Amino acid sequence: MISTRLHPDKQTAAQAIAGEIADLIEIRSKSGKTTVLGLATGSTPLPLYAELIRLHRAEKLSFRSVITFNLDEYAGLGPSHPQSYRFFMEENLFRHLDIPAGNIHIPDGLSKDAAKNCADYEAAIRAVGGIDLQILGIGRTGHIGFNEPPSAADTRTRWVHLDEVTRRDNSVFFGDLAQVPQGALTMGVATILEARRVELIAFGEAKADIVHRAMKEAPSAACPATWLQQHPRCTFHLDAAAAKAL
Ligand code: GLP
């Protein structure tokens, strides 16, 4: 079931979600447990990451007990490529926190054996007991992670071909469409649905149509975000513009 939470602006949404993450980390670490976070890239989660960094600096929130798994990575891009998701995460979150380097997981865009890398990724998630809380954005094609249409509910971490709409949307970061990789490694829909909590964030009018489809269309591979309707604990964090069509 999807519940919606309306926020007046990005900053307020970031504070609310960061507060939930901080509570989860603190409660679990008090009883010696790790917290497993699923993380997203794109412009949407940036205010959230800035707020987590602020909580770490100003409120001494520690990330030593946190384990992270990112949703996806571009095929062919390594950690030093400025558009790789590994680079993005280091710059915008990890290097500012006290998270142990060994606790960070991102699919390897340079892997020579993508199938093995993806199977190992699934195994690593299972080995730590699954994802406690998954952060998601949403693409205009209805993709979550890089699960482009069609993506079935039973898909797992795998190599995917990127939709041309997504390549065009993301070309602003690369400066040139030809530089945008054709493929990516992404957690599957089933991987995402197994997270115990899902927090999807969408801001702005450009996301209004896809937010409406994700919540109102019957779940199908044609709009992968619709599968979230089958999740027991999924919240869409929206501003008024993104909620406009609901
Ligand atoms: C990318 C990522 C997604 C993200 C989406 C939306 O394609 N793979 O995880 O949700 O873009 O990006 P933005 O938040 O910039 O709109």
Image: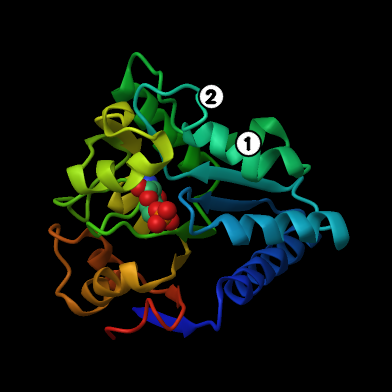
The residue at the point 37 percent across, 32 percent down is 74
Q: Secondary structure at mark 2?
A: loop
**How many labels were placed on the picture?**
2
| 2 and 1 marks in contact (CB < 8 Å) | yes
Amino acid under label 1?
A: Glu
CA distance separating discs 2 and 1: 9 Å
Measured from the top left, where is residue 114 in percent x and y? 32, 23
Left or right of 217? Residue 180 is right
The residue at the point 36 percent across, 31 percent down is 118
Measured from the top left, where is residue 162 in percent x and y? 23, 39
Residue 51 visible in image: yes
Give the quadrant of the N terminus.
Answer: bottom left
**10 Å crowding of disc 2: few (<14), some (14-19), many (20+):** some
Amino acid under label 2?
A: Pro
Residue sitting nearer the eye, 11 or 110? 11
Q: Which residue does the numbered mark 1 point to in the structure image?
A: 90
Q: Is residue 154 above or below residue 162?
A: below
Left or right of 222? Residue 181 is right
Left or right of 183? Residue 192 is right
The residue at the point 61 percent across, 68 percent down is 14
Which comes sooner in the sequence, label 2 or label 1? 2
Measured from the top left, where is residue 206 in percent x and y? 32, 67
Q: Secondary structure at mark 1?
A: helix
Disc 1: residue Cβ within 8 A of ligand 1's nearest atom: no
Left or right of 169? Residue 152 is left
Quarter where residue 207 is shown = bottom left
The residue at the point 47 percent across, 31 percent down is 84
Q: Is residue 158 above or below residue 155?
A: above
Residue sitting nearer the eye, 119 or 208? 208
Q: Which residue does the numbered mark 2 point to in the structure image?
A: 79
Measured from the top left, where is residue 4 in percent x and y? 42, 82
